[in-house]
Image (tube, rainbow, N blue to C red):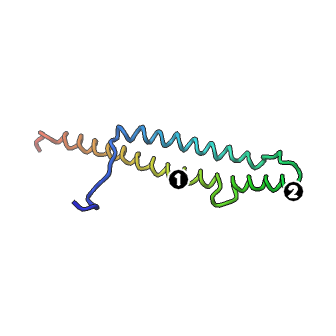
């Protein structure tokens, strides 16, 4: 059997709770992104140049840089959404296969 013949699948009874868990995790990540929006108004560093510089660094770590918190959360959302889509596909494939089996069994024993 070659590597291209191997198929990885997940039992639909396992895939359904995994898909739900992915949806919950995505919602939590989106909530964190929403919470991060409040950091834009985050203050309390004072009016000294050092305080303003520190405030700028916190804002950059949250939004401005490629490795910012929001970018990392968005990356996690995309990864978990891909997993959720895969688990949903496993469920959909099982439903389709079940329907195919039912349809073929309906024809057993019938004469034309």
Residues 96 and 36: in front is 36
Residues 99 and 13: in front is 13
Residues 52 and 22: in front is 52
Compared with 50, 20 (above or below) is: above
Q: Quadrant of residue 4?
A: bottom left
> Any mark on residue 49, and which?
2
Q: Position of residue 62 (x, y in %)?
A: 69, 52
> SS for tag 2?
helix
Q: Quadrant of the C terminus?
A: top left
Could you classify mark 2 by the number of other residues whose Cα lies within 10 Å: few (under 14), some (14-19), or many (20 or more)?
Answer: few
> Any mark on residue 78, and which?
1
Q: Quadrant of residue 94?
A: top left
User: As drawn, is 75 to the left or to the right of 50?
Assistant: left
Q: Earlier in the sequence, mark 2 or mark 1?
A: 2
Q: Position of residue 26 (x, y in %)?
A: 54, 44
* Residue furthest to the right: 47
User: As drawn, is 30 to the left or to the right of 13?
Assistant: right
Q: Position of residue 69 (x, y in %)?
A: 64, 52
User: Whole-Å distance between the Cαs marked 2 and 1?
Assistant: 38 Å
User: As drawn, is 22 to the left or to the right of 34?
Assistant: left
The structure residue drawn at horizontal position 78% and vertical position 46%, both measured from the top left corner, is 42
Q: In this figure, what is the number of numbered marks?
A: 2
User: As drawn, is 80 to the left or to the right of 104?
Assistant: right
> Any mark on residue 13, and which?
none
Could you classify mark 1 by the number of other residues whose Cα lies within 10 Å: few (under 14), some (14-19), or many (20 or more)?
Answer: few
Q: Quadrant of the N terminus?
A: bottom left
The structure residue drawn at horizontal position 44% and vertical position 42%, both measured from the top left corner, is 19
Q: Nearer the viewer, mark 2 or mark 1?
A: 2
The structure residue drawn at horizontal position 52% and vertical position 53%, both measured from the top left corner, is 78
> SS for tag 1?
helix
* Residue furthest to the front: 50
């Amino acid at each position: 059997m070659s590597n291209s013949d191997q198929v990885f699948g997940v039992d639909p009874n396992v895939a359904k709770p995994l898909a739900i868990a992915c949806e919950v995790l995505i919602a939590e990540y989106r909530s964190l992104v929403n919470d991060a929006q409040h950091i834009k108004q985050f203050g309390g560093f004072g009016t000294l140049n050092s305080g303003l510089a520190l405030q700028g660094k916190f804002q950059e770590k949250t939004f401005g840089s490629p490795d910012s918190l929001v970018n990392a959360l968005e990356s996690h959302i995309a990864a978990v959404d891909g997993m959720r889509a895969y688990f949903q596909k496993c469920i959909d494939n099982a439903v389709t296969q079940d329907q195919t089996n039912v349809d073929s069994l309906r024809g057993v024993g019938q004469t034309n």
